[in-house]
Image (tube, helix red, strand yellow):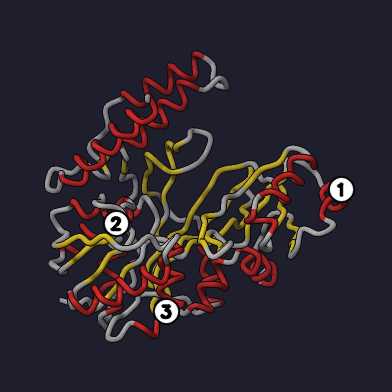
Amino acid sequence: MQRVLILDACQRSALSVTRSLGQHHVPVITADSSVNALAGCSCYSSSYFKYPDPQTRPKQFIDFLIAITQEQDVQIIFPMTELTTTLLLENKSKFINVTLPLSNLDAVNAISDKSILMKTAESLHIPIPKTWYVDTPENIKTTLDCLAYPLVLKPGMSWLKHNKRWFRSTVQFADDPRTAYRIVTEDPAFSAHPFMLQERVPGVGKGVFALYNHGKAMAFFSHNRLREKPYWGGVSVLSESAPIDSTLLAYSRQLLDSVEWHGIAMVEFKVSEDGQPYLMEINTRFWGSLQLAIDAGVDFPWLLYLITTGHDIDEVNDYKKGIRLRWLLGDLDSLYISLKSKKLSLYNKLVTLLLFLKPMNFKTRHEVNRWNDLGPFWWEIKQYIKSLINMAA
């Protein structure tokens, strides 16, 4: 078994990868920029290391990883975020005898850059929201005055560099030209980088999760989001494994095949009220509800490890449907947001509370709190209490 270093250990996806590989007796070490971390508290993490913050000290971050991989005899690195993925690929030649289970940088940029992705989708006749591409905000006011609202302002990349510092960009929404112009001129994600303007598509978010082996599709998975944080749309806190929509699967294959993808990817769509799907983005990292796929029978981390170590694997064409995954503290946050909201009626708040308190069926598993590995849950509880104290202070 080759030793694996899992980065971004505060991510729930990192915990899922740690548990998956550890249960297959793969030696795992974890690391993040904090003193301790969620995955680092798992019984399957043999060691935990604190590295320099890649957002503010990218060079020192890479230097640390080079040193630790040599010191700990690490042969594979699993990054969990777009930022650490990008930094690793940009410095790939510096890592000797270390394998990155990733596509090359050009392929990653081709689908993580949303502007390039949308143009690729158009060329493949895959539906996208009505889109305007903006390279520079100069003279943008005239354009904004002519567009229909509400409008979505979407940065080209999830992580951007500004004034020698990396920052995470966010999608913004505008109900009128004045708001849109303020966002474009004040937010460096738009004022200093190319971006897109898109019509807002009301509907339901759908995702297709994939694993590829040097251009060959090996596994797909899909789930339904039953509850999210916040309740109007965000991170999944209760999800259920579901059949894959054939249209979304075909679109996902076209996009990933076009760049001869390697590794994992999450293709996100918005399905409108009339059933029309629109491509939103592709994430080139493990997703938050990864544990659900593992529980349903698609063990993406283990399959990726096997591919990376040169093993032949069979295609995964089926998995258990109706399996549920609950992120308990995330669900609690979602409940709090719902009860506090002024937009929900008293009746809707009562229904939300009753659904939260409703006993889970035997097909539901908790994401973080698991009896055979309780360390991460205790760590999460402590962090949760600290955040509540800080909010009250």
Between tags 3 and 1, which lies in front?
3
The tag on residue 35 is none
Q: Secondary structure at mark 1?
A: helix
> Which residue corresponds to the image point at 49% horizontal and 77% vertical from the top-left?
105
Position of 367 relative to 231 (above/below): below
Which residue was labeled with disc 1?
146
* Count of residue discs: 3
Give how far across and how far down residue 208 sits, in percent. 47, 58
Between tags 3 and 2, which lies in front?
3
Specify the amino acid type for callout 3: Asn
Label located before the other in sequence (3 or 1): 3
Give how far across and how far down residue 284 sits, in percent. 46, 65
- Viewer-proximal residue among 316 and 16: 16
Give how far across and how far down residue 175 sits, in percent. 73, 37
> Which residue corresponds to the image point at 38% horizontal and 43% vertical from the top-left?
239
> Which residue corresponds to the image point at 25% horizontal and 52% vertical from the top-left?
35
Quarter where residue 380 is shown: top left
Compute the Cα span from label 3 to label 1: 43 Å
> Which residue corresponds to the image point at 13% horizontal and 54% vertical from the top-left?
43
Position of 387 relative to 348 (above/below): below
Which residue was labeled with disc 3?
91
